[in-house]
Image (cartoon, rainbow, N blue to C red):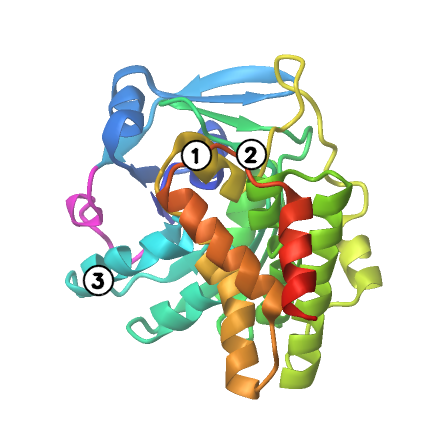
Amino acid sequence: MRMVMVGAGAVGGVIAARLIESGADVALVARGAHAEAMRRDGLTLIDPDRTITVPVRVLNRVGDVGLRPDDLIGLAVKGQDTEPVLDELAGLDVEAPIACFQNGVANERNAARRFATVLGVVVMLPAVHRVPGRVEAYSSPIPGLFDVGRYPSGSDAVCERLVALLAEAGFDARVVPDVMRWKYTKLLMNVGNAVEALCGLDRDGIELVVRARNEAREVFDRSGIEYATDDEERARRGSLLQPGEIGGHARPGGSSWQSLARGTGTIEAEYLNGEIVRLGRNHGIATPVNELVLREAVVAAADRVPPASVPAATLLARLDASLG
């Protein structure tokens, strides 16, 4: 099974590098300076213990790959960048399964409108991409955890093959027939991503994250959406992820932090906090915390402000004033 990884940022790049190192057949779809650097010099992966560089086949578009029926297409782009990829794939009359290595819960839903076999993948991979041609994985010896299942539920031989491929590359991976339950669990964590990016995680920032997550739990509970308990989530993680340092520094921030740090102009909050807002509106549940975080994150990304430019205390004060 060849892995066609669409997106070579922190997640896609680390997965691709480890797969290639393990001997897997990988084609990587990427653009811009990152793609040029990988074509010229290979893909460099740095973790707390070592640095490796692997040769990688890099294409600019999915249509350039020459897709085969036995390919597995991995989506590792952010939610806001998914629709153009799905549009391109739909124009290729693709039969290959699609695995969503993405945060949020909307990507599988959108892919399933057009493709018969869609896998959800819960990604727990502390990684960073800041420099063209290079990705950093901050956990060692196990770089990341993956839960894999069919969307909307179930499992099959494709899930088993993907898990085996990831395990061979050194990841901890398992098949879960209730994958969306675990993806909603991860979404509870990810509603704090924009807060980290906007404000940092000082005492006020942590308070804002707690409020956003409590609000999300209430929305899930009142909407009938299932998610794993805290004990289940802790048992899944255990001590498998061991965060380390690279160059004497811990991981600077998550995916939304990296979007602001790189000045991309967009941020994934619409598919994280925005999902809570959408559910709340559908079920008549107020979501003022996630609405505020979403609005501020979108403005900050569009204005290309650096991370931690918005004091969390200011947002908390605005929130409290709006609630009377």
Residue 290 in picture, x, y percent from top left: 58, 63
Question: Which numbered tag is attached to residue 38?
Answer: none
The magenta segment: 60-70
Q: Is residue 113 left or right of residue 125?
A: left
The residue wearing badge 3 is 87
> Which quarter of the picture shows residue 184?
bottom right
At 31% from the left and 61% from the top, the residue drawn is 96
* Residue 101 seen in the figure: no
Secondary-structure class at tag 3: helix
Residue furthest to the right: 231
> Which quarter of the picture shows residue 243?
top right
Q: Nearer the viewer, residue 161 or 121?
A: 121
> Which quarter of the picture shows residue 65?
top left
* Disc 1 and disc 2 in contact, CB within 8 angstroms: yes
Please name the amino acid that badge 1 sits on: Gly
Secondary-structure class at tag 2: strand
Please name the amino acid that badge 2 sits on: Ala
Give the main secondary structure, helix, strand or loop, of the magenta stretch: loop
Task: Decide: is 302 above or below 224.
Answer: above
Identify the image quadrant of the C terminus. Answer: bottom right
Residue 297 in picture, x, y percent from top left: 48, 50
Q: CA distance from mark 1 to mark 2?
A: 9 Å
138 falls in the magenta region: no
At 58% from the left and 35% from the top, the residue drawn is 308
Question: Which numbered tag is attached to residue 127?
Answer: 2
Task: Decide: is 156 above or below 314.
Answer: below
* Residue 26 seen in the figure: yes
Task: Decide: is 294 above or below 156.
Answer: above
At 18% from the left and 47% from the top, the residue drawn is 66
Residue 123 in picture, x, y percent from top left: 57, 50
